[in-house]
Amino acid sequence: MTQSKLELADPVSGKKAELAVHPGTIGPSVVDISGLNKAFGAFTYDPGYGFTAACDSKITYIDGDAGVLLHRGYPIEQLAEKSSFMEVCYLLLNGELPGKAELDTFKTSITHHTMLNESLLRFFNGFHHNAHPMAMTSAVVASLSAFYHDSLNIHDPQQREVFAHRIIAKIPTIAAAAHKHSLGQPFIYPRNDLDYCSNLLHMFFSVPCEPYEVDPVAAKALDLLFILHADHEQNASTSTVRLAGSTGANPYAAISAGVSALWGPAHGGANEAVLNMLEQIGSVQNVPKYLDMAKDKSSHFRLMGFGHRVYKNFDPRAKIIRAMCYTVLEKLGSTNKPLFELALRLEEIALKDEYFVSRKLYPNVDFYSGLIYSALGIPRSMFTVMFAVARTVGWVSHWAEMISDPAMRIGRPRQLYTGSPRRDYVEIAQRSR
């Protein structure tokens, strides 16, 4: 693709800068602004980095206006319909869909990395019984670096692969252990005869005193949720992983940083907030009242699960997950059907309201995912942990892409300084206060 140039000129000083314009495969081009400071003595200002490309990537593409999400070029709708989470993991990590033998080898590798070192497993007993599962997950992920020294050389491609397989395999075991510790139940070991999502459900819900059979509907629903949450381009947690990893920190520390970033309610906690909102609304009769509150700027009520930082039309994942909601609640979620029906009615009314339509506030993936997790029996405190389990492969893929880039540099954002100008120190006896 041909690189073009953009010329900027300061009409006062007469200074000029010629900036390279880099085209992408699809989507908007980016302007290399590295020459601005030299030419004009200025930096760009972009709070929240909403209009700044901090890297180039071949992993995921989003067109927010058109509602498009592609992983390595494949539409999320096709992957959700035809693929599996393990196949999507392979795709994100390696760039291509696997052949049968490649996928079998990959699955075998993941399966045989699922156990935790017994000493690491005992770490959970150091947490209070009511510690938040995300606190446990973040801490234990970071602690993996103290046990697996054979995969800490970030410049060795083979060690990077071992790390990738190891963390993807162990994150469900860590999540399940956090859940069991919260309940005061015994930890359940992984089973190599189960697939990825069935194994997670087994570790979550089985107990030593009686047999547990994984419901295939539950396993399929979880697999779909994981596909839909596997990666989402340069979001806050992925950018955090890249920034932490750019220092050369061990990869477990970088992933732990991503877990911590995901913990924020504006990022990974939105599906829990949706359920809380639906329970607050209570019934279909109250929907108009709460929609009016959402329009009132003086009200503290927010319509959770609507709108998205990137998608300005619709979230393609929401359409897919909505259909799965019907299947799961039909089979497993009788206690959640009133909330689901309320969610459908809220969606229907909101999408006919000019206020929300004009602002392109459409349902996003979080609007329905919490309903499915709840129907599966997963408590709300674990929703964000489940998000972290799914998103780990995306974090790892972006980390590995960055580390293998010869042009990688440590992340170092600049700032607009608005504090005090230079001033001299005043002795304490001479200060007026």
Image (cartoon, helix red, strand yellow):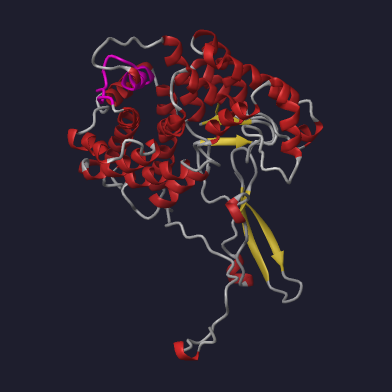
Residue located 41% across and 41% down the image: 259
**Is residue 188 a member of the stretch shown in magenta?**
yes
3 is within the stretch colored magenta: no
In the displayed structure image, the side of residue 361 where residue 276 appears, left or right: left
Q: Is residue 9 left or right of residue 171?
A: right
Furthest-bottom residue in view?
Answer: 430
Q: Find the magenta span and give its range.
A: 185-204
Write the residue at 72% across / 70% down. Answer: 10
Disc tally is 0
Identify which residue, 50 or 379, lies in the foreground. Answer: 379
Residue 34: % across, % down: 56, 62
Q: Where is 44 relative to 210, above or below?
A: below
Residue 324 vs residue 167, the one in the foreground? 324
Q: Tell me where residue 355 sits by quadrant.
A: top right
Residue 241 visible in the snapshot:
yes
Whether residue 350 can be seen here? no
Q: Nearer the viewer, residue 166 or 327?
A: 327
Picture layout, residue 96 above or below residue 146 = above
